[in-house]
Image (cartoon, rainbow, N blue to C red):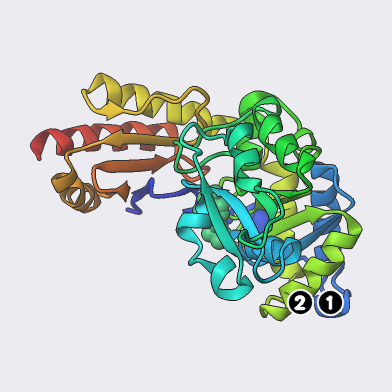
Amino acid sequence: MSPIDLRSDTVTRPSPAMRQAMAEAVVGDDVYGDDPTVRRLERKAAELLGKEAALYLTSGTMGNLVALLTHCTRGDAAILGANSHILNYEGGGLSALGGILAIAADDSTGVIDPEDVRHHCRPPNVHFAPAKLLCLENTHNRCGGLALSPEQMAPAASAAQEQGLAVHLDGARLFNAAVAWGRQAKEYGALVDSVQICLSKGLGAPMGSLLCGTDEFVDRARFWRKRVGGGLRQAGVVAAAGLYALEHNIERLRMDHELAVLLAAALGKGGLAVEENPKGTNMIYFAVPAAKTDALCHRCAQRGVLISAAAPGRIRLVTHCDISKEGAEEAGQILLEEARAL
Ligand SMILES: Cc1ncc(COP(=O)(O)O)c(C=O)c1O
């Protein structure tokens, strides 16, 4: 029996209908601009985000990296949330490959205070690396999968833009945020200069991200994608899965959120210290004694429930399209039993 895999929404497998779309994809050499399926996917993403253009890339990490390389030059500074994915989990690519200085701002509430943005911009001065970019994240992974409304994101974005900075949104799970708030993705797109969305998370595609922005920005980003080795040839085979995901899998994210609410309630009722979330999506975080974190993961795995630790003492569960209500209930039961037995 296959395990109930709650480690991430990246573990989803393409559905039969998605595989069918992949098998039937019309393809060409995308580096020559000849792949009609990639072109359709890029147009569709640009339309959903309300941007002029979009660029298909292999991963969210590459999408964010290419955005940073396109917005900044060596020696520039980018302001990022201290808890952001870009700062914590993308291998320091912005510094390693872009020579970009990362300035960490407090984002413990999921947003960056506009005062902090202004403070980190700093005036032109030989002592300061010039800040060129603010990066935001929505939903915010380390902040519990928190969904921000456009109104909550706007103050930081406009504070940066007033100081002449560009704003990039790491929207790996932006559609989760949009669905949670009942808003259009383009309402978020309107606040920022560029946005990266992932197809390979809750949307269920096997790979791929899109970086959206103006025509001019995307042309330059295409050049950076090639430079980092990300130009693809008959990519329509995988782009077809992404197109299928954008056409069929956005609204169903609501079901993942509902499942997360049910699972969180069951775990809380069973005595686990589940974190509160003012606007949760498909993630549940709960606390366990730090020294027992690995043991819990291990014991659950032995019983067919895969979970992962975000940090010692902090477990994260993620619901997605390959988790049924019965699977979530069974996983909750096993988790509670194993947590009690620790
Ligand atoms: C918020 C956020 N941004 C970016 C990424 C990177 O995406 P990828 O794993 O496709 O590189 C992730 C991955 O989980 C993420 O959670």
Asked where in the image residue 290 lies, by quadrant, the reply is top left
Q: Position of residue 252 (x, y in %)?
A: 62, 35
* Residue at 35% from the left image edge and 21% from the top image edge: 265
Question: In the rendered image, is residue 252 in sight?
Answer: no
Ligand 1 appears in which quadrant? bottom right
Q: Which residue is more in the foreground, 337 or 75?
A: 75
Instruction: Give above or below for 82 relative to 335.
Output: below
Q: Residue at x 61, y 27 (%)?
A: 180
Three-letter amino acid code at disc 1?
Gly
Residue positioned most to the front: 126
- Measured in 3D between alpha carbons, the distance from the residue under mark 2 to the one under mark 1, in whole angstroms, is 5 Å
Lower sequence index among marks 2 and 1: 1
The residue singled out by tag 1 in the image is 28
Q: Are marks 2 and 1 in contact (CB under 8 Å)?
A: yes
Residue 59 in view, yes or no? yes
Q: Position of residue 126 (x, y in %)?
A: 66, 62
In x, y percent, where is residue 76?
67, 63
Q: Percent from the top left, x then y, of residue 212?
A: 78, 53
- In the rendered view of the protein, which quadrant contains the C terminus? top left
Q: In which quarter of the image is residue 226?
A: bottom right
Nearest the eye: 113 or 11:
113
* Residue that badge 2 annotates: 234
